[in-house]
Image (cartoon, rainbow, N blue to C red):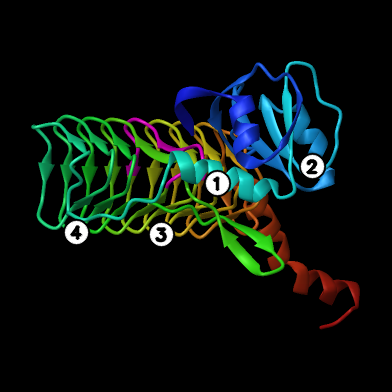
Amino acid sequence: MKFITPIPVRDIAEKIGARLIGDDSLMATGINEIHQVQPGDITFVDVRKYFDKSLRSEASIIILNEQAECPEGKALLLCEDPFTAYNNIILEHRPFLPMTANISPTAEIDPTAIIEPNVVIGHHVRIGKYTYIQANSVIGEHTIIGDQVTIQAGALIGTDAFYFKRTEQGYQHWRSGGRVVIHSRVQIGAGCTINKGVSGDTVIGEGTKLDCQVHIGHDVVVGKNCLFAAQVGIGGNTVIGDEVILYGQAGIAQNLTIGDKAVVSAKAGVSKSLEGGKLYFGTPAAEARTAYRELAALRHLPEFFSDYYGEK
């Protein structure tokens, strides 16, 4: 999530009650979780084993709860509860605003767009030229939709990220400060659900087509001209390349990369990153030629054991 204007790190330290270590002249331009950080971003860490990863990341400002050596050109903000400090910064700059009308007065909708009855359009949404949104869809806050996009009936775009911090009191929900960005000439099928990013963007690339009841998790980035059949599910922070085909009910786990032009068969379960340009099958998914040979070999096992033990 980017701030409207840069914020001095000294002001952030004062607001969250943190001790500032390192470069006190830095200006924060955004805030993001560790998977999405860029230079100028704030991030946080509260588990010692992840300190090194955070300190070496692109983030310029790190909120943490233990003393650490500050890398050159960065700033550390030392406080008791980094998660709460981080979450409060998100809430300050992306406060929760309930809807009071079907279409928010802050939404920017091109006059050529077609919006059917009972569509809900949230705060600060932008909708491009000749886009068509069918009845009973919900377009959540800060969603960006390009030109000539079709969103079929009952789709839910920009729902909260399924993302929780585990605490002694239970699971604490993060404020979702990210967005959904849908590029031009995308089609979203009926009943699809697309979560916004935790603090980054969930992106659907130009020309991609989603069948009905597809779920896209938080911070997923989908490339151009992909084709996803019904009931595909993609876990958070996964990156899908261009021209990827996912057949019905394929499940893609979180934090993976699927290469360009990969094809995943129906009902496959993908638990590891996949190279592009290949066909995958099964659970766990494997390259189809290998998986089919393994299945063929399994069918011959009874015959093999019969011959080995001399059974008739």
| Range of residues picked out in magenta | 196-209
Residue 266 visible? The answer is yes
Q: CA distance from mark 3 to mark 2?
A: 35 Å
Mark 2 residue crowding within 10 angstroms, few (<14) / some (14–19) / many (20+) = few
- The amino acid at mark 1 is Asn
Compared across the picture, whether 233 is left or right of 58 comes to left
Q: Could you say which disc has been placed on residue 136 in the image? A: 4
Residue found 46% across the figure and 31% down from its top: 242
Residue 177 visible? The answer is no
Nearest to N terminus: mark 3 or mark 1 = 1
Q: CA distance from mark 1 to mark 4?
A: 33 Å
Give how far across and how far down residue 147 sits, in percent. Answer: 22, 30
Prevailing SS of the magenta stretch: loop
**Nearest to viewer (mark 1 / mark 4):** 1
Q: Which residue is mark 1?
A: 88
Residue furthest to the bottom in view is 312
Nearest to N terminus: mark 1 or mark 4 = 1
Q: Secondary structure at mark 2?
A: helix
Residue found 61% across the figure and 65% down from its top: 171
Mark 1 residue crowding within 10 angstroms, few (<14) / some (14–19) / many (20+) = some
Q: Secondary structure at mark 3?
A: loop
Q: Secondary structure at mark 1?
A: helix
**Nearest to viewer (mark 1 / mark 2):** 1
Compared across the picture, whether 255 is left or right of 47 comes to left
